Image (spheres, rainbow, N blue to C red):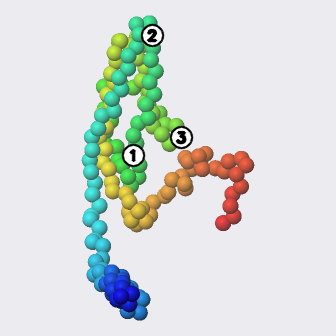
Amino acid sequence: MKFRKIILMLLLISVISPTDSIGQFPPRPRRNYTPRPPMAPIQNNTVEFDLLYEFFAPKETDKINLLIVLPQTTQDRQKILSIKYSHKPSRTFRVNGNRYAEFVFFRPEKRTKLKINVKARLFRYDLLTALETKTKHYYEDTEFQDFLKQEKGVKQRAK
């Protein structure tokens, strides 16, 4: 009786186990390799969006200065086609690679709204596009050197 139980257990184990008679897993069927489909042509998308600012001022408010960072053209990524303002900015200027618009409201109404409409063309920019493009990188631009310089107490690793 004991011998039958042992034979039955061995038979059951051999049916359940995924290994073959010498203890190895059977080879898996190979999947067919399909190469990656060719890249779609570079597409340019034109988008239009609004930047909306709304603020409330008490009656005693004489003046409000509002400084806003504006989107700008970035090579190989986006081109700003137009920017329209609901209120004319008092000035626009550039600092550290960013473009700003300053708005000054004298004796503003209790509720003031500012709308900036931006129209831009966006370009596909992924790793393959970056590798194919032979343009200057940000770290090579002198405008960004202040942000990329070594900090005190941090030793630069030898190359």
Label 3 or label 1, whichever comes before in sequence order: 1
Residue hosting label 1: 73
Label 1 or label 2, whichever comes before in sequence order: 2
The image shows residue 100 at horizontal and vertical percentages of 45, 33
The image shows residue 57 at horizontal and vertical percentages of 40, 13
Tell me how far mark 1 sits from mark 2, CA to CA: 35 Å
- Is there any visible trace of residue 10 in the rendered image? no
Q: Secondary structure at mark 3?
A: loop
Task: Name which residue lies at 30% across and 48% down.
Answer: 121
Tell me how far mark 3 sits from mark 1, CA to CA: 15 Å
Residue hosting label 3: 96
Where is the N terminus found, in terms of image quarters?
bottom left
Q: Secondary structure at mark 1?
A: loop
Q: Nearer the viewer, mark 3 or mark 2?
A: 2
Q: Is residue 152 above or below residue 14?
A: above
Task: Name which residue lies at 38% across and 63% down.
Answer: 129
Label 3 or label 2, whichever comes before in sequence order: 2
Residue hosting label 2: 62
* Horizontal side, residue 96 vs residue 34: left or right: right
